[in-house]
């Protein structure tokens, strides 16, 4: 036995073991805390952890020139992809279907000045006896418009971009929410709720004095 081993007291060895156990417990507590309270951004937390949204924010190119008409049918799939942030399916023959309780389009204007008007061609997804879909619009977090789509036909919906939405820069986040979205079933989407079909989108400079009054529909 070496000299150093002869003079290690039992109490010293016990203290070392205890300190090691405490260190391991602290590490395990840190791992558990990271699992329960991960340090993630607000978009990730809202979608994956809190479940407060069905629309996960992601990056898109979004560059847009005023006046361009973007098709959301199959013929415009490549271009439309530049603006679809979340809450959209791939395009079909009758347009791009919404997925979930909300959807988002992002537009980065190359020649921004107010007033600007957005126009969307949309149709409701209906399942009898339901005959309508309500759609609420906001731009950069500002509630902007609301409409009720009745019947299966495509409708043109226009909304004016608030001047305050352009204060922080030329990027517009257009959010659509669907309080009446159809729940998934085995015969329809087994994962997401469905509400509308978007066929086209455009922005134009609106003439002064021709502003559209903001719609308002109280939720049921």
Image (spheres, grey):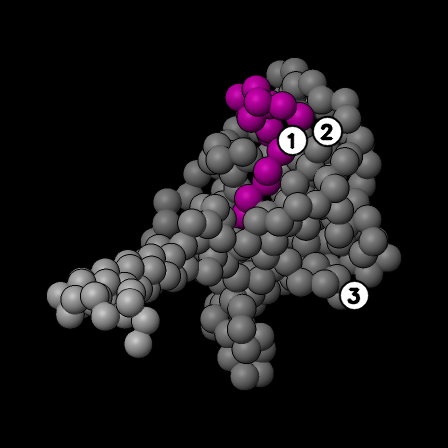
Are the two marked residues, 2 and 1, in contact with CB atoms closer than 8 angstroms?
yes
Name of the residue lying farthest toward the right: 75
Residue at the disc numbered 1: 171
Q: Which stretch is magenta?
A: 160-177
Q: Residue furthest bottom?
A: 186
- Identify the element where label 2 is drawn: strand
Q: Nearer the viewer, residue 194 or 165?
A: 165
| Viewer-side residue, 23 vs 108 | 23
Q: Position of residue 143 (x, y in %)?
A: 47, 35
Disc 3 crowd rating (10 Å Cα; few below 14, some 14-19, many 20+) is few
Q: Which residue is mark 3?
A: 93
Q: Nearer the viewer, residue 11 or 216?
A: 11
Q: Residue at x 82, y 48 (%)?
A: 79
Q: Residue 168 lies in magenta, yes or no?
A: yes
Name the residue located 65 percent from the left edge and 20 percent from the top edge. Answer: 115
Point out which mark residue 7 bears.
none
For numbered disc 3, what is the local secondary structure? loop
């Amino acid at each position: 036995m070496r000299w150093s081993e002869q003079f290690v007291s039992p109490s010293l060895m016990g203290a070392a073991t205890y300190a090691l156990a405490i260190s391991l417990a602290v590490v395990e507590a840190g791992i558990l805390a990271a699992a329960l309270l991960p340090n993630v951004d607000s978009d990730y937390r809202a979608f994956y952890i809190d479940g407060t949204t069905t629309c996960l924010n992601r990056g898109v190119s979004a560059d847009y020139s005023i006046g361009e008409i973007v098709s959301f049918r199959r013929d415009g799939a490549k271009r439309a992809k530049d603006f679809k942030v979340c809450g959209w399916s791939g395009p079909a023959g009758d347009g791009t279907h919404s997925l979930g309780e909300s959807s988002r389009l992002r537009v980065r204007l190359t020649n921004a000045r107010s007033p600007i008007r957005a126009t969307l061609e949309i149709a409701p997804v209906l399942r009898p006896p339901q005959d309508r879909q309500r759609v609420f619009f906001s731009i950069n977090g500002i509630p902007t418009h609301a409409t009720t789509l009745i019947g299966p036909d495509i409708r043109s919906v226009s909304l004016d971009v608030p001047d305050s939405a352009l204060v922080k820069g030329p990027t517009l986040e257009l959010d659509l929410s669907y309080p009446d979205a159809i729940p998934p079933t085995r015969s329809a989407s087994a994962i997401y709720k469905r509400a509308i079909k978007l066929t086209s989108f455009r922005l134009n400079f609106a003439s002064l004095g021709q502003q559209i009054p903001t719609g308002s529909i109280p939720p049921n």
